[in-house]
Amino acid sequence: MTTTADPHISIRATAIQPSSTLAITARVRAMKADGRDIIGFGAGEPDFTTPDPVREAAIEAIRAGMTRYVPVPGIPEARNAVAEKFRTENSIDCEPDQIIISNGGKFSLYLAIQAIIDPGDEVIMPTPAWVSYKPMVELAGGTIVEIPTTAESGFLAAPEDFAAAITPRTRAVILNSPSNPCGTMYDPDAIRAICDVLSKHDRITLISDEIYERLVYRGREHLSPASLPSMSGKTITINGLSKAFAATGWRIGYTCAPLPIVKAMSKLQSQMTSSVTSFTLPALVTALQSCQNEVARMRAAFEKRAGLMERLVSVWPGVTCPPPMGAFYVFPDISVAFGRTSAGGRAVDDAGSFAEALLEETGVAVVPGDDFLGCGPNHVRLSFALDEASIEDGCSRTHKWLDALS
Ligand SMILES: Cc1ncc(COP(=O)(O)O)c(C=O)c1O
C-alpha cells in the first residue's frame, strides 16, 4: 500500500537547525563546481593536507589488517599518547583511563554534554560562540545562558560576568579559547581569574574546547584550565586533530576528563558509534608524537595570513574588527552596511543579506554571524584558511563592494 502522508519527524529533529557554517561550505562547493569564481572565507577548515606521516600511519594500519572493532574509548597506545600530550603540552595531570577518543571534537563535545547535562540544567557560555554548542545543550534538555561580549573587549567575558550568570541551576560553563568565530583568546591570567570563580562552585563542570590551542599568534600563550589544581577535578578538556593537523575529514577528537565522566561518555559512545574508525588510531599516535614540525609550519603560515587579514580588513570603510589572536577567523562588525543598497541593487538589512549580496555580486563567501549568538547579527565570520593570493583577492573584492554601497 502506498501513502502520500509525510513521514513523522521527531520534535527533536524538527527543532534543531542545520549547521549554518557547513551549509555555507556546501554552497561554496556547489558554486565552484558550477564554474563560478568563488573566494571561500566560509569554511572552518585548514587548506593544508594532513601531514604525510599521519596518512602513512593509517595506510600502514590498513595494510597490517587493523580493520576490526577496537575498544570503545580507543586502543591503549592511542589513549597513552593522548594522555602524554595533555601531560607534556598542557600540564594536565592525567592518566590514560581519563581519555576517550571520539568521532571528531564535535562528537566529543556532544558526548560530554550528554554525560553531564540534565533537563533543566543551565550552561553558561560567552557569546558570540561556535554554532553547535547551543543545539547540543538543547538536545540534552539544557538551556544556554549567554554572557554577551563585545568587540571592544576582544569578545572576552570578565570573571564578574561568570559570577553574575551563575544560578543554582548552573551545571556547566563552556569556554572556547582561542575562539571560533571571534579569533580572540583569553590570556593565562584571565583564565586563572575565571577559574577562581568557577572553582568555588561544586556543581559546575567546565567544558574547555581547546581545538584551536596550537593556532595562536604573536607569542600568545594558551593555558588549559585543567592544569590548575583547583580545576583538574571539574574540567572536561576537548581537543582533536582537525585544526592543528589539517585533518578535518578524519573525524578524530579526544577528551580528558575526570574518570566518572569518561566512563559515562564511553557508555554513551558504546551505544552510538562503538568507537572511532580503527585505523585512524595509529595515525593519531603518529600525529601527536611525530608531527611537531608540520604543525609549526602550518601555524606559521596561519600567523602570516592573520597579519595580512588584519591589515586588509582594517581598511574596509566603517568596519571594525579586533585583531586575530588565535584560530583562523576574524569576526568584523559590518553593521555599517545595514540600511544601504549594494551596487547590484540588493537591500542590505542584516548579516544574512550582506553575505548573500556579497556572494552573488563578488563571489566572496562569508558566514553571517547570527547563529553565533550575542552581537553576532552585526558581524560576519571570515576564515583565513586559504592562500594569501586568495585572501588579497577576496578582501579587495569586498572592499570595492563596500565602497559601492549607497
Ligand atoms: C570551536 C570548535 N569546536 C569544535 C569543533 C569540532 O571540530 P571537529 O569535529 O572537526 O574535531 C570545531 C569545528 O569547527 C570548532 O570550531
Image: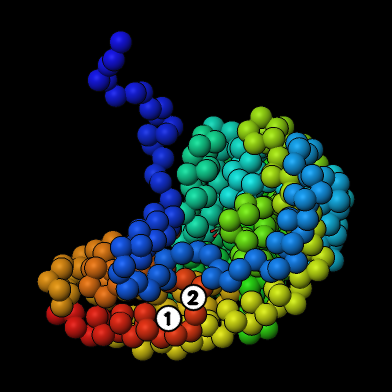
Examine the image and state in which quarter residue 311 appears: bottom left
Secondary structure at badge 2 equals loop
Please give left or right for residue 123 compared with residue 95 in the image.
Answer: left
Q: What is the quadrant of the N terminus in the image?
A: top left
Label 1 – label 2 distance at C-alpha: 7 Å
Residue 61 or 356: which is nearer the viewer? 61
Q: In the image, residue 10 lies at what x, y percent?
A: 41, 27
Q: In the image, residue 67 lies at what x, y percent?
A: 75, 41
- Colouring used for the render: rainbow
Residue 103 or 99: which is nearer the viewer? 103
Badge count: 2
Secondary structure at badge 1 equals helix
Mark 1 close to ligand 1, CB under 8 Å: no
Q: Residues within 10 Å of mark 1 (few under 14, many from 20)?
A: some
Q: Amino acid at mark 1?
A: Ser
Q: Where does ligand 1 appear, by image quarter?
A: bottom right
Residue at label 1?
390
Please give left or right for residue 126 compared with residue 6 in the image.
Answer: right
Examine the image and state in which quarter residue 373 appears: bottom left
Q: In the image, residue 135 lies at what x, y percent?
A: 47, 44
Residue at label 2?
386
Q: Residue at x 86, y 51 (%)?
A: 77
Residue 121 or 364: which is nearer the viewer? 364
Q: What is the quadrant of the C terminus in the image?
A: bottom left
Q: Does the image show residue 117?
A: yes
Residue 285, numbered label: none
